[in-house]
Amino acid sequence: MYSQVNKNISRYVTFDVNELEIFNSLLEYTAVPKKTNMLQEGEMCNFEAYVIKGCVRKYYIDANGFEVILQFAIENAWISDISFSIYEDKPSRVYIETLEDCEFFMFSPETKEELFNKAPKFERAFRILMQRSLAVTQDRLFTTISKSATEKYLEFLEQYPTLSQRVAQHYIASYLGISAEFLSKVRTKIAKI
Amino acid sequence: MYSQVNKNISRYVTFDVNELEIFNSLLEYTAVPKKTNMLQEGEMCNFEAYVIKGCVRKYYIDANGFEVILQFAIENAWISDISFSIYEDKPSRVYIETLEDCEFFMFSPETKEELFNKAPKFERAFRILMQRSLAVTQDRLFTTISKSATEKYLEFLEQYPTLSQRVAQHYIASYLGISAEFLSKVRTKIAKI
DNA sequence: TTCATTTCTTGTCCTAGTTCAATGCATGCG
DNA sequence: CGCATGCATTGAACTAGGACAAGAAATGAA
């Protein structure tokens, strides 16, 4: 049950058995049904979740009520809005919603602190995870600005081959920053080639 | 000389005098003239720099040779491309260039490790800095996708009031993800109101 | 001061992507 | 089973912003 999450957290930092036991003892297993809102705008995000099973989306809603999807998280990914919430004491501007029935390992801010106190090396592992998220987001910003809709869609298919079968197309459009109708047109054009 | 950087690093974590002395002893002061390339695509980024004075830009170059600016860093900001470079051993895809004569406090990957070994609490401070960068980048991605050129420019002026006087307009356009010509048109339209 | 280079502006034409609306297709639910 | 709701597709009209070109203004180096 813990082998995947242990592998994930050990990717850039090596932990001994004792440290991993502490880590596992603090993880809280939680099952959440499909279509559940786990975080809403204005709330504080009080979890950091590792996806054991299922699929989640994280999104903003803009001034005209349009959703902009920031992240999909599937098996073995982390999802949260730690960005401002915990340290700035500002409420979150994002929504987090399950798209499928999900299972998570969760940390609350308190248990994460406890982890860092009991095994300070985890501080480093989470710092590196954070760096990688930043790199991914920067790359996405670049792609969003510099590429055409077709290029973005093809790149998405390459990067997340399974996701296009799992989530509705209009969610993918929202992730790519284009309208659902236009994505459909892009797809028919690609299919013709 | 160290008071600003000490204030910056202490924003979310409190350090004692001894820890700050270690920190300061490892910082390497460096002056870099205007228009100097500090990092190029394909290189490893071997520094993490705190800007004492001056202005720097970090950018990608896309397939058609167009620059996309990811970040401006001015006084009291950090600039680097730690994203992949150090842990993934992948060369960087970004460029970093000084726009003005600059003064920095620099860390190499090695001295940063030394800092973490001698005073592990800095691991936490850098993790939180990283979280904040991620939050800023996510917000920017949202703005880039969901707002019009005019809205983006007005928001930029609010967020970075001094920067619009310091850097060339076509750099701001590149940061906002619009063409330099169109930014000029946006500006004359705004001025007329 | 002069010349050169870079930056900014303005106009015209053009296109990628949007918006709106209609239709067909699935899917889930009583 | 039939119905309702959400999802994808397609078309037509529209628009925000891009590309190109030419000139004006600013900056800077000799």
Image: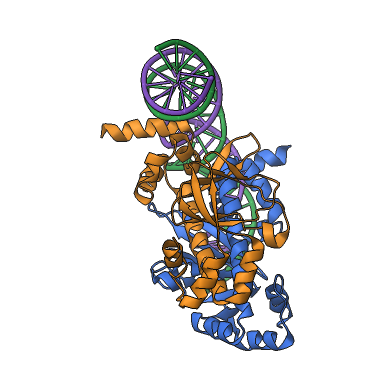
Chain colours: A orange, B blue, C purple, D green
Which of the pair B164/A188 is nearer the observer? A188
Q: Measured from the top left, where is residue A93 in percent x and y?
A: 66, 48
Observer able to see residue B80 = no
Is A148 placed left or right of B56 in the picture? left
Q: Write down the quadrant of residue D19 in the picture.
A: top left
Task: Please state which of residues B52 and A8 is positioned toward the viewer in this rendering.
Answer: A8
* Residue B93: image location, x then y, percent: 42, 63
Please state the horizontal and vertical placement of residue B27, each as a whole percent of the image.
60, 84
Residue drawn at x 65%, y 44% as measured from the top left: A40
Q: Residue furthest left?
A: A193
Instruction: Work out whether B57 lies above or below B125.
Output: above
Q: Is residue A5 placed above or below A118 in the rendered structure? A: above
Q: Residue at x 57, y 82 (%)?
A: B116
Kindly identify the residue that appears in the image at 54 percent across and 76 percent down. Answer: A121
Q: Position of residue B51 (x, y in %)?
A: 63, 73
Q: Is residue B127 visible?
A: yes
Rendered-image quadrant of the C terminus of chain A: top left
A28 vs B181, nearest the viewer? A28
In the rendered picture of this protein, how many numbered marks are placed on residues?
A: 0
Q: Nearer the viewer, residue B9 or A115?
A: A115
**Lateral position of residue B21 relative to residue C11, left or right:** right
**Left or right: where does residue D25 sit relative to residue B179?**
right
Q: Quadrant of residue A76?
A: bottom left
Which image quadrant: the N terminus of chain A?
bottom left
> Is the residue B127 above or below the residue B163 in the image?
below
